[in-house]
Image (tube, rainbow, N blue to C red):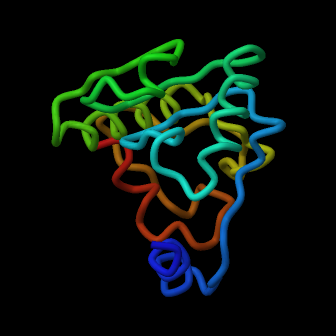
Amino acid sequence: CAEAEKMGPGLTQGYFGYRDYDLANTNCLVAWGTDPVSSNRMVPNMIHRLGEILARGTVIVVDPRLSTSAAKAHEWLPIKPGTDGALAGAIAHVLLTESLWNADFVGTFKDGVNHFTAGRAVDESLFEERETHGIVKWWNL
């Protein structure tokens, strides 16, 4: 299973190594379709770290199953199988139309004005990122 964990990022992003998460500094953990304390290459570390994150921050689990992590989480979203894409789209819609993204990290529009309006396409030339790959256009629709 370790090779599969390395192969996906290796083929798509050019990094053939293990990815470690900054759990010691995590204040909000969203486990989407996974149970990190049951299925992870470092289960003992994750069990320990989950307790720390629960004490200092927020744990949200998006999974139809009431897994071990979901049972401990502050929020468990027991979505119906196959509806997670709609939930992700809805979350993205709110983040974009209400300007809730971290503009310093992600970037923003050249003029600093949020041009994301529900139901209206955005002119990609307004965004400061040069390579939007068409993503900016379809988020609002």
Splitting the image into 4 quarters, where does residue 130 fall? Answer: bottom right
Q: Quadrant of the N terminus?
A: bottom left
The image shows residue 11 at horizontal and vertical percentages of: 49, 87
**Looking at the rendering, which quadrant does residue 48 occupy?**
top right
State whether residue 74 is above or below residue 85: above
User: Which residue lies at the image location 46% right of the left edge and 71% below the top edge?
Assistant: 133
Estimate the x, y position of residue 60 in percent, counting from the top left. 51, 24
- Residue 100 in picture, x, y percent from top left: 61, 28
Q: Is residue 16 left or right of residue 90?
A: right
Q: Quadrant of the C terminus?
A: top left
77 on left or right of 19: left
Residue for point 74% across, 27% down: 27
Q: Nearer the viewer, residue 39 or 12?
A: 39
At x 69%, y 23%, the residue is 51
Can you say whether 34 is above or below 21 in the image? above
Is 44 left or right of 52, judged from the image as shown?
left
